[in-house]
Amino acid sequence: MSDLPSMNVDELQAALADGATSVDVTRAYLDRIAAADGELGAYLHVDPEAALARAAEMDSAGTRGTGLTGIPVALKDVVVTKGVPTTSGSKILEGWKPPYDATVAARLKAAGTVLLGKTNMDEFAMGSSTENSAYGVTRNPWDPQRIPGGSSGGSSAAVAGGLAPWAIGTDTGGSIRQPAALTGLVGHKPTYGSVSRYGLIAFSSSLDQAGPMARTVLDAALLHEAIGGYDPLDSTSIDAPLPVLAEAARRGAEGSLAGLRVGVVRELGGEGHADGYEDGVLTSFAAAVARLEAMGAEVREISCPAFDLALAAYYLIAPSEASSNLARFDGVRYGLRVGDDGARDLDEVMALTREQGFGPEVKRRIILGTYALSSGYYEAYYGQAQKVRTLISRDFSAAWDGGNGAGVDVLVSPTTPTVAFPLGARVDDPIAMYAADLCTLPASLAGVPAISVPCGLSEGLPVGFQIMAPALADDRCYRVAAALEAALTDERGDRGFLDQLAARAATTEGAA
Amino acid sequence: MSSDRLVDFDEVLTRYEPVIGLETHVELGTASKMFCGCSTTFGAEPNTQTCPVCLGLPGSLPVANEVGIESTIRIGLALGCRIATWSRFARKNYFYPDIPKGFQTTQYDEPLCTAGHLDVEVDGEIYRVEIERVHLEEDTGKNLHVGGATGRIHGADHSLIDYNRAGIPLVEIVTRPIPGAGAKAPEVARAYVNELREIVRALGVSDVKMEQGSLRCDVNVSLAPIGSLEWGTRSETKNVNSLRSVERAVRYEMRRQAAVLDEDGRVVQETRHFHEDTGSTSPGRSKEEATDYRYFPEPDLVPVAPDEEWVEKLAAALPELPAARRTRLSEEWGIAPTEMAWLVNAGAVELVSDTVAAGATPTDARKWWLGELARRANDAGVELAELAVTPAQVAELVALVGAGTINDQLARQALDGVLAGEGDPAAVVQSRGLAVMGESDELVAAVDAAIEGNPDVADKVRGGKVAAIGALVGAVMKATRGKADAATVKRMLEERLTAG
């Protein structure tokens, strides 16, 4: 049998249908974790016994060899899991074992998957490098001296490093797409409201979405289909059928994009807006655009002027909501409690708990959000940011509807302005860190779906290509991404983008 | 004991004009909580009616209870409010252990209902109370402070929290400031709360039990010098939880604030606590140190946009409201408005109505509820409705008297039995042997005994002093312990003393 942890999920499915056991598959990943996670730091919690027991259970289930039965999965630690420690990367939740499952976790359980573990993340999903975790950094499998992106950096490192076949991430301003881009994965942020938020520890309620992070577009689509769709437990959940995603991916992989109208967003790395974008990223992006054109797409440039305001609006809206969402961590009901020695009063205990339980970035955003919502400042900050959000949505609508010309079907941009940067490079410069999400923020603020698919290497590091589509047209993201992926895979003659990492690792080991 | 200096109430009115305002919280009687499926039953073991949502566990999300929204709109409609076509929930952010999320889900600048009014009557005069808004929010948990003498947080050894109440739907009804009530301000406040309670009860959306906290009142009072164009600074007395307390709180605050103003002092804008035992108030936290609640629209809930057609349907389906009902009943019962006002103040309208429905005449029903029953409720210190007798039982008593089975005095004894839980009136009459005596041998013997035992009186009657017969009747009644029918006894005596 070939190396299980380097298989795509559709290959694992075939292997399981062919007689391989989930216990074999699960053990292979657990072995990889045992061997490599000391260096990578992708996981916060792994329970090998529980995983193997679950795998054995799935091996004797009636559904064995079908669907996702017996396929392992890793969950970002923001996803609440019944009886399994869930910290959201924060000290303040250390030791908390939730009494319930998030809808995403429950659906994956119902689909027969095996939970490998919970992955590291920036504390409460606030960050772009996973350096804000209270439990240590995670390293990029492509270069351990570099960040794996964030906030879903544990999930990206786990999948890229072969420590999980796929993983769930969450995306508030880019936290699925950016780490996927920086580690050579496919990562999709679904339409807001199309994947349940019930049981995701909230960062910014109006932006948070869970989504798949996978080795291939098809895998991502399969995982998305397993978690998506209406959930009565989430009031913002959309009561509409999920588009058929895996089928869209398969259709896209056939290679024709004839008639597809593609808009290249000028404000995201285009002329006059290329400051901060690495040449290697722009070159790789341009080559991918040319490839879409070669497959029959009509490409033109689209201007979305309000996108320039996305960063400012995002850093008012997200912290404002966060300041309120994180108020429940007061030491009264669960998690950390500091200073309850009988001498201190309630306010002191709450203050001490929060002072010691939250890291600096979380505190920075709570203060920012508290200020923005304060009486007298609300209109100038939160109110104004909401108006910008409306303008960004209008830019998207104009792109789809066409305004003065014909509209486009998808908008594209680089996923990130740069490739993975070195650990520590931006920790002391929050603004530089925030700029890592420049390209991903507009889709978050407008609630539209966006996917990142690898489009090449720059300085030996992955570059991500972002495809944005109208709300509920997630299938379009998958179709176009699959077409690009297929073209690039054909050109390289491998099974997928991550084969390059495996090949390089083999070369390095060979040289050593 | 309060150390506040107080001005005599009548004297307050010689110098100041009160303005009052009321914020009333009504706990809705929905089967489940406002944002989760937990039960709302009162009095369950602490923290047994909770789930991840109402405990505010990380990751949990609210889903609005549609019945809660409907009930709020119905209250708004009954108060003549405008129903919003677009309304949102908002987060009110503050730290306190009884709010599990660190914010309360409430409504801020986009409430479900606005601009209504409620007319209340005090001593024949109508006062129009303008309603500013009616909005929907969630209740908090309850803190229990253990180990202190007072049950308050100061001096307590530790505190416990019960989240059973957290998330129960709460409708807040806010009046606009009510000027012009003068000396009647305390009674207007009371009458408003009473009328509001009647309306909510008529709608069937809450049991409005003040003693269980399903109706709670915050009472705002300010004073301004007579003739002043500006209103004074108000105090907000929290959790005033009986009708009587509402009246007392207004009265007390008027007297206290007058004393402060007389001394050329400044009334502090603050919340105050009401003390049932002394009828006084004491300071809570002042607004100067109040939290900035940082309200913003609740992103976890979608806006509520009540469909116009639906609202019209709800309006058309409103039950007869108390005021209209009273007008109709006054006519049906043939009573004057003032008499109806007594019934309202006694909380007896429904009881009388139900008694009439059970077959009694309006006159008899009113006589019993405002007379004998009111006296007994008063003696026991309970509301009329809390007496252990049903309108049907009262109607049965009236019927037994009407049929001559018992007389009024026996009926009171039968009522004793009913209140003691011995069963319905007829059963009590049977078991206690209360039926009026017919012209039985026993009665004949009692009559003869009375004549023999009072020969002087008997002679007077025989001699033509007919009025003296009363003493003999009394003797017979006494001997029969009231079970005889007085008219029958009188006739029997007359037959014996005046015929021969």
Image (cartoon, rainbow, N blue to C red):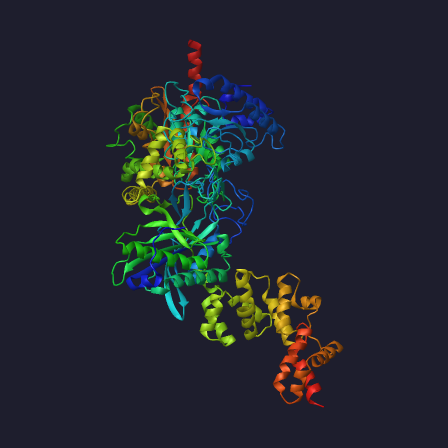
Dividing the picture into quadrants, the one containing residue B12 is bottom left
In the image: residue A170, left or right of residue A11: left
Which percent across, then down, holds residue B376? 56, 64
Where, quadrant-wise, is the N terminus of chain A in this rendering?
top right
Q: Which residue shows up at 46% across the image and 27% down it?
A: A119
**Quarter in which the C terminus of chain A is drawn:** top left
Q: Nearer the viewer, residue B321 or A242?
A: B321
Q: Quadrant of residue A56?
A: top right
Q: Residue furthest top?
A: A512
Give x and y (percent) for residue A423.
35, 21
Label count reads: 0
Q: Is residue A365 left or right of residue B166?
A: left
Query: B454 or B166: nearer the eye?
Result: B454
Residue B130 image point, x, y percent: 36, 62
Asked if A56 appears above or below A469 in the picture, the reply is above
Occupied quadrant, residue A48: top right
Task: Give the image location of residue B284, x and y in percent.
Answer: 37, 47
Seen from the viewer's position, the closer of residues A392 and B45 is B45
Residue at far right of view: B441
Is residue B84 visible to the viewer in this orientation of the structure?
no
Tell which residue pokes out farthest to the left in this image. A272
Can residue A422 be seen here? The reply is: yes
Left or right for A127, reference B354: left
A455 is higher (above) or lower (below) than B500: above
Locate residue A24 relative to residue B235 in the image: left or right. right
